[in-house]
Image (tube, rainbow, N blue to C red):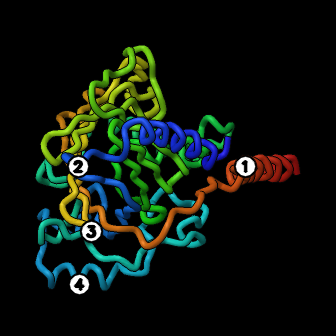
Amino acid sequence: MPGWMFLGVALAAVSSAACAGGRAPAKHPDLSGFWSTASLTQEERDDAFKTLSVSEADAAAYEKKHRGKPPEDPEDTVGGGDSEWWETDVGLARIRGQIRTSWIVSPADGKAPMTAQARAFGKARSARRKVDFDNPESRGRSERCLEHGAQPPLENGGYNDNYQFVQTADALLIYAEWMSSWRVVRIGDARHLPASVRVPGGDSIGHWDGATLVIETTNFLPRDVDAPNGDAAADMKIVERVTRVSPTELGYVFSITNPARYAQTWMGEVAFHPANGAIYEFACHEGNYGLANMLAGARHAEATAAAASAK
């Protein structure tokens, strides 16, 4: 089913709730709107920085070097970084007057605290994907169009960094431009699904803590938990705290607990500002011809090598 049809189903559900209970009650802020996380700031801190916040002069020097250029991707071996349009005409994020060098605020080094096992697993997988084109399952989720852009935490990736929030009295719909994906947060007296039920992007329930919507997400698919030992029963918990700071800014803080991958719970803070316009459909590879072409290219290379060897 196309992304716009999925969104239509979700909007219908939220609209039904709106008809029954109206929009967000006056006692709670309305988080609805089109939002963007576009920024040169990324989840982990660039090695060019040693601290969470920097001076205007240091930020200007960094922005001059990186504005207008796609982020470097060591995994890119087919030139994708050169052919895609990147949202790079942005600077480092500003949060409460501080110029941030990473979304991660804890640990203090701005790096995700992966376990040694998880790091070794990730390194081996990256090396394998440079040479393994045997079948679709050997490729990454992005190449297979299996990413879930609305899965927490909501961050940025260099392009398609836009979100739409639609809020009612008992639900919040989060629609992500990336992969045209969505997530419905049930607000109020909600309970998580049984532990045996796993859903893409996780199962999200929320409650109000004053002016802040607190969202807890569990019941992730095994591929989302990504346990290095392949434990299909492993799960993670992500807590998001969303606050309307002003008419033009959302405060967004998250924490991730995933013992299968991380040595400790870690936290991040992301800047959300109004998006410049509505969100258009994101079509992953426009039918995923990219994956088919990669596999076909590998078969061609194998045939060429075999013919050369036969001679």
Q: What amino acid is labelled 4 in the image?
A: Ala
Pair 3/2: label in front: 2
Q: Do the residues labelled 1 and 4 touch (CB within 8 Å)?
A: no
> Which residue sits at x=60%, y=37%?
138
Q: How far apart are marks 1 and 4 (CA)?
A: 42 Å
Camera-nearest residue between 162 and 235: 162
- Is tag 4's residue or tag 3's residue first in the polypeptide sequence? 4
Q: Is residue 68 above or below residue 210?
A: below
Pair 1/4: label in front: 4
Residue 240: image tag: none
Q: In this view, does 291 lie above or below 86?
A: above
Q: In this view, does 59 lie above or below 252?
A: below
> Which residue sits at x=43%, y=65%?
158
Please, what secondary structure does the residue beneath circle 1 have?
Answer: helix
Please, what secondary structure does the residue beneath circle 3 have?
Answer: loop
Q: Name the residue under label 3.
A: 248
Q: Are marks 4 and 3 in contact (CB under 8 Å)?
A: no
Q: In this view, does 100 lie above or below 185?
A: below
Q: How far apart are marks 3 and 1 (CA)?
A: 48 Å
Q: Name the residue under label 2.
A: 26
Q: Distance between the residues labelled 4 and 3?
A: 27 Å
Crowd band around label 2 with a 10 angstrom C-alpha radius: few (<14), some (14–19), many (20+) = few
- Is tag 1's residue or tag 2's residue first in the polypeptide sequence? 2
> Which residue sits at x=25%, y=66%?
247
- Is tag 3's residue or tag 1's residue first in the polypeptide sequence? 3
Q: Is residue 66 visible?
A: yes
Q: Mark 1 points at which residue?
A: 298
Q: Are marks 4 and 2 in contact (CB under 8 Å)?
A: no
- Is tag 3's residue or tag 2's residue first in the polypeptide sequence? 2
Q: Where is residue 47 in the image (x, y as percent from the top left)?
A: 23, 64
